[in-house]
């Protein structure tokens, strides 16, 4: 079972409105991850997630060491291909 990761719009960190594994209510995305996951062999390192990032906003990836934060960023910039989904 993958470790839970929190994806949040930085404007909502203080008021507890950030959602787990998806932020998909943004009007227009600069980058969009749709059902993106990453596995190495049988080990799932990033569970399927959906995330839209708007231009001009600040976002934060929060989670413990080894939960997939760097892997998500590497997929977003094209260094690592997702196992499923599209960016």
Image (cartoon, rainbow, N blue to C red):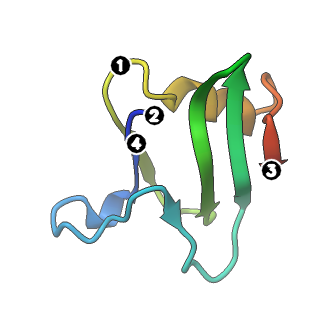
Residue, disc 2: 1
Q: Is residue 65 left or right of residue 38?
A: left
Specify few, some or many for label 2: CA neighbours under 10 Å numbering under 14, 14-19, or 20 or more: few
Tell me the residue at 71%/56% (across/down).
35
User: Where residue 23 sits: x, y (%)?
Assistant: 51, 67
Residue 65, labelled with which disc?
A: 1
Q: Is residue 19 left or right of residue 12?
A: right
Return the disc, 2 or 1, that comes first in the chain's sequence: 2
Q: CA distance from mark 1 to mark 3?
A: 24 Å
Asked if disc 2 and disc 3 are in contact, CB closer than 8 Å, the reply is no
64 or 11, which lies in front? Answer: 64
User: Where residue 68 sits: x, y (%)?
Assistant: 51, 28
Q: Nearer the viewer, mark 2 or mark 4?
A: 2
51 or 46, which lies in front? Answer: 46
Specify few, some or many for label 1: CA neighbours under 10 Å numbering under 14, 14-19, or 20 or more: few
Residue, disc 3: 85
Return the disc, 2 or 3, that comes first in the chain's sequence: 2
Tell me the residue at 78%/35% (across/down).
82
Is 15 situated above or below 51?
below
> Helix or strand or loop: what does disc 4 sit on?
loop
Asked if disc 1 and disc 3 are in contact, CB closer than 8 Å, the reply is no
Q: Is residue 80 left or right of residue 38?
A: right
> Helix or strand or loop: what does disc 3 sit on?
strand
User: Where residue 16 sits: x, y (%)?
Assistant: 19, 66
> Helix or strand or loop: what does disc 1 sit on?
loop
Residue, disc 4: 5
Specify few, some or many for label 4: CA neighbours under 10 Å numbering under 14, 14-19, or 20 or more: some
Is 81 situated above or below 16?
above
């Amino acid at each position: 079972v993958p470790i839970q990761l929190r994806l949040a719009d930085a404007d909502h960190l203080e008021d507890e409105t950030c959602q787990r594994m998806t932020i998909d209510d943004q009007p227009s995305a600069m980058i969009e991850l749709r059902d993106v996951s990453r596995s190495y062999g049988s080990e799932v390192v990033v569970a399927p997630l959906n995330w839209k990032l708007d231009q001009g906003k600040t976002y934060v990836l929060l989670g413990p060491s080894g939960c997939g934060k760097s892997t998500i960023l590497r997929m977003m910039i094209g260094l690592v291909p997702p196992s499923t989904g599209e960016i």
